[in-house]
Amino acid sequence: MFDRVAYVEFITASGEMKRLEGIDVKFSISKYMGVVMNEATIEIYNLAKEDVEYLTTFTSQFIAYDKRKRIRIFGGYKDTSVGLLFDGDIVEALPTTPPDIVLRCKAMTGHYGNSTIISKSIIQPITVKDLLKQMPEWTGKDVNDFSTTDRKIDGFYYTGASTQLIGQINNIPDITCFEDDGVITVVDSKNPNINKEIRKISKSSGMIEIPQPDALGIKVKMLLDPDIRLGQTIEVESSAIPACNGQYWIYEFTHRGHLRGSEFYTEISARRK
């Protein structure tokens, strides 16, 4: 079995970064394609007293609430693949009471953007491609556009939180827009394709238990994979349930990990291609 790796980085309101590694951490990270923001919960055990005070003081939502506070969670396996699992805004970071102090954090993608109001209007016809090219200036975030649409719209009007702009973009037919770790991604709604590589999932590649068919496609559980992405194509191979074999695209997944516990896997929900 590969040696597990998990660590976190806190970025305070002043921009100072503190990395915590070599300690026990537990996390659950859920990512969604669409307007629902990604979310994470994390528990950090056995911190030094000064670390608890530092992190609680500068990352609690009750202190300097109007200042952005972020957390980045990394995970994977030593000597194989360690990657960024989550990058988002801290909603809460508070310790439990002694004697066993645990720092419990909650975070969401784009939470800080809910308090940033923007107003944009385009009165002339514009292609969706040209509209998307303006989003980095509007939102302050990079945009990865994997869509193939040639649609033209009559105009575009929006006033509201910068985070909710994604919902307005999703009203345009044929495309789906979502934010993942600070980057806005746009794909074709019916056949997303964020890269040409197809991730094969089978017992030999780390699939746990058997795939579960559902109304939309399939649910499959595998060893934690930091390289899994929303909109990615997977190919499932199961000798136990051959009817589930085939290609799907990921619309939702959850990383669950506990560095010194039993959990360290990724649960995927995907639609049949």
Image (spheres, rainbow, N blue to C red):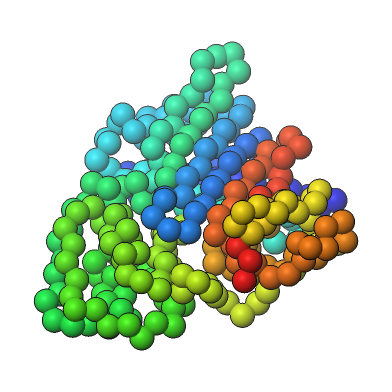
Q: Is 213 drawn above or below residue 250 in the view shown?
A: above
Compared across the picture, whether 197 is left or right of 113 comes to right
Q: Residue furthest left?
A: 123
Picture residue at 29% right of the left edge, 70% below the top: 135
- Residue at figure coordinates x 40%, y 65% from the top left: 177
42 left or right of 162?
right
Q: Locate residue 262, reporting x and y percent.
A: 76, 37
Q: Name the quarter where the C terminus is drawn.
A: bottom right
Q: Nearer the viewer, residue 53 or 2?
A: 2
Q: Quadrant of residue 173?
A: bottom left
- The percent position of residue 141, horizontal first and vertical second, equals 34, 65
Image position of 137 with respect to 28: above or below: below
Write the residue at 81% across / 48% down: 209
Rendering coords of residue 220 (x, y %): 71, 54
How many numbered badges does the structure rendering display?
0
**Residue for point 74% across, 35% down:** 261
Residue, far bottom: 150
Q: Position of residue 195 (x, y in %)?
A: 57, 77
Q: Quadrant of residue 239?
A: bottom right
**Residue at the far front in the pictured view:** 215
Q: Is residue 154 left or right of residue 20?
A: left
Whether residue 130 is visible here, answered yes or no, is no
Pick the front one: 216 or 149 = 216
Q: Nearer the viewer, residue 258 or 14?
A: 258
